[in-house]
Amino acid sequence: MAMMKVLTGKYRTTGMAPLDLSSCSKSDILEYFEASYDLNESLFTGLKDEEAFYKCPDRLRLPLIFYYAHTATVYVNKLMLAGLMSQRVNLHFETMFETGVDEMSWDDTENYRMGGSFQWPPLEETVEFRRLVRNRIRQLIEDTPLQLPITQDSPWWAVMMGVEHEKIHIETSSVLIRQMPITMVTTPPKWKYAPASTGASIKKNPLLRVEGAEVTFGKPEDFPSYGWCVEYGQRTFKVPTFEASKFKVTNREILQFVKAGGYENSSYWTKEGWKWRCFRQARHPTFWVCTKGCKSGCGAVISSHSHCLPEYFTTTYSDPNVGHSNGNGISPQNGVQNGTSNGHQNGTANGQHNGNECQPDFRLRVMFDVIEMPWDWPVVVNYHEARAFCAWKGPEFRMLTEAEFNMIQGGALGDPSKGVTSDPVFHKDPQANFRLTFGSSSPVDLYPPNDLGFHDVYGNVWEWVEDHFNGLPGYKQHHLYDDYASPCFDARHGLMLGGSWASDGTYNSRFSRMGFRRHFYQHAGFRVARTLPGAGKSPVVMVNTDVYILGAGVEENDLTVPETVGLEVVPMSSTNKQFHQETEEQLAAMLALQYGNSGQNYSKDLADFCVEKANLYGCPLQNVVQLGCGTGGVVYQLARTYKEVIGVDYCGRCLDAAITLQKTGEFHWPTPNKAKKPRTENGTTTVSIPADVQKDRLTFKQMTWVPNEIPKADLILMDFLDRVTNPKAWWLRLWEIVTDNGIVVVISQKVGKDKLSADLGKKFDLLEEQEYQFQDSQGQSKVAMATIWKLKL
């Protein structure tokens, strides 16, 4: 029985085309919002009971109750930042459901919220929260004047951001639900799987030649649809002639790799990939089902579950309507209509072409069922598995590069200057499996090829490519979602393109670029490619910036590719400029600034300045938050006066030093040649904190924005605007985290009252502005501007 009580609107199983932001109306926006909200909730009707909401289908992800409520929380947070909302719906929920987890490795320790002692709210209260948010947004859309076009500077951009963010989670939640034990899900009404085959098995996947050319890609700033920051910018490459497979690699093709022992042969795998394979004990793609008790990726109380047991090998679908079209009238090739083909439905086939001549020992887990293996569907794998398959196929084989993917799109789309007609997501009959036309993948030949002969360039499953995930030249972060992508520009995230059957809205756009860790599972596959002999080497972008991980340090970053695959590595710096500050030299400079003594102690003087201003304006001296605490020098001084002190920074290397000082009272590091030296012994610099500091008053947090978990404080000190990439993203929430009787102190050489007043002036009174003199890490005298702010009465 479907869990219909989780719906706050209508039940829905399909998506809809995105909006043209140059011509949409309020009614269009409301319909688009409602459709997204409905579709997301409808996925969760496939959970068998309330208990399933509190299970972790992936050991490195949170329970499903989090993802059910998370998108509503993001709506509120972004609309508050944009000024379209002035009152929160439920701050407790908007804190609990705000931030997910992004594991650094496949063997990370489980987060305590993943099923330990953490108490999630009852489902009934969570449903009511979503209902209240829905009603608030409905009213907001009706009441807010609409000016077209909606651009990145428009407050309406926040509305579209919330909708498109929900569409991302429709897909990621579908992956998580697909990972749930089959006994914990049930097929919702009208859910339809694609046919297993179009009639004849796909026995060959020929390589098609693409002539070398210059290719330019990236979304124009003025394109009239919503876009994520990582899509904008532009890159041009000259790409030599190459070949790529006509179809995405199918389950049938991967079967040969499995039968040949590909999962047991380390020579096919990268070093990182083989470590993952051994840790997960993978024997076949994760959504394949066998009877050998394979290890699952489930977490917490269901961590011992295996999808691969005899009792789960029986097909589970029974509804005769499953597999039929919803009547949208798709028109794929080979006479396939309404989700059936020559008697094929439910992902099975009647007759000799059902693919079982390949191997009867595997079935496939789809969203809510186990079905007979559809061998003509594209295989779903992570990057490591795709790379291993290519190596097994032959030393010259690889995946496409991002530039090559943009070349196989063909010429039919035309130049982006044509507007929305150049993007297939806006086409009335897109001839592709996306927007949940089916609730599953589909045969790779179900839809006709493009003008170059390639099938499924968009939709069905995402395509892993060889490039690292990184911003394009000209990349800029948006202040409403400063950390949407930038933390992932770390050389550890792979790039996926093209969207899948579960991608909705702009997620299937020709411009869509999505980054996931290489061990991550999405509805993603790949196609094989190779550079032709004598054609030259195809460029592949790899991030060469060393990224420091809090508590782990700098991990090895392999920028090499096999010589035989015809690729030339184009090393690129991470477009997250804050990563470039994670160096030993920057750490030395911060320690010298905050703990050095060149006639002036920066940390003590700044702390004394703040306490003086707090006393002047009659502020309580209970708690303080410093945004940009660096290595902790100022907060240690403030802890001599304030009872509770929180230091926030994005810099992992600096925070490691601050935390070491909290634990031991001292921090030692090799002295760089030009560093100021607080105290030196044998080439090592040592800093220490005052002996009278009560260290238990301090808490350090690594943050890339100001989340709701930061509590209200009597003093907010912000002295790092000169080193952050997007200062506005940090000051927009100041009014929510300062107490009514508290003050905000901003110290900056670049940002004064004029720039701050445009945003802070809406909520704050400027109490004073004055010059603030200090000495930098090199002992040079500097002058900054200090502005003091207090909430308007």
Image: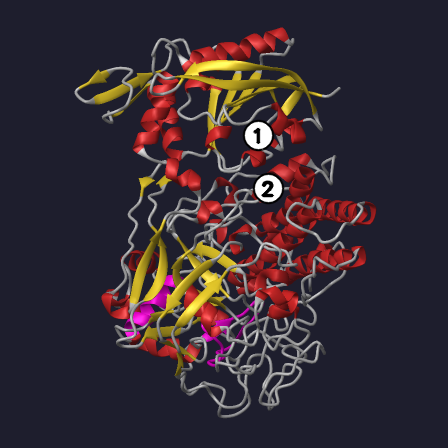
As for residue 388 lying within the magenta part, the answer is yes
Q: Position of residue 663 (x, y in %)?
A: 36, 22
Classify residue 644 as left or right of residue 211. Answer: right
User: Which residue is the site of mark 2?
Assistant: 98
The percent position of residue 44, horizontal first and vertical second, equals 64, 58
Q: Amino acid at mark 1?
A: Ile
Left-right relation of 340 to 485: right
Q: Determine whether label 1 and label 2 are within 8 Å by CB.
A: no
User: Label 1 vs label 2: CA separation?
Assistant: 12 Å
Question: In which quarter of the view is residue 20 placed?
Answer: bottom right
Residue 271 magenta-highlighted: no
SS label for mark 1: loop
Q: Which residues are magenta?
A: 363-392
Residue 414 in percent (x, y) is at 57, 72
Q: Which residue is mark 1?
A: 710
Marked residue nearer the N-terminal end (1 or 2): 2
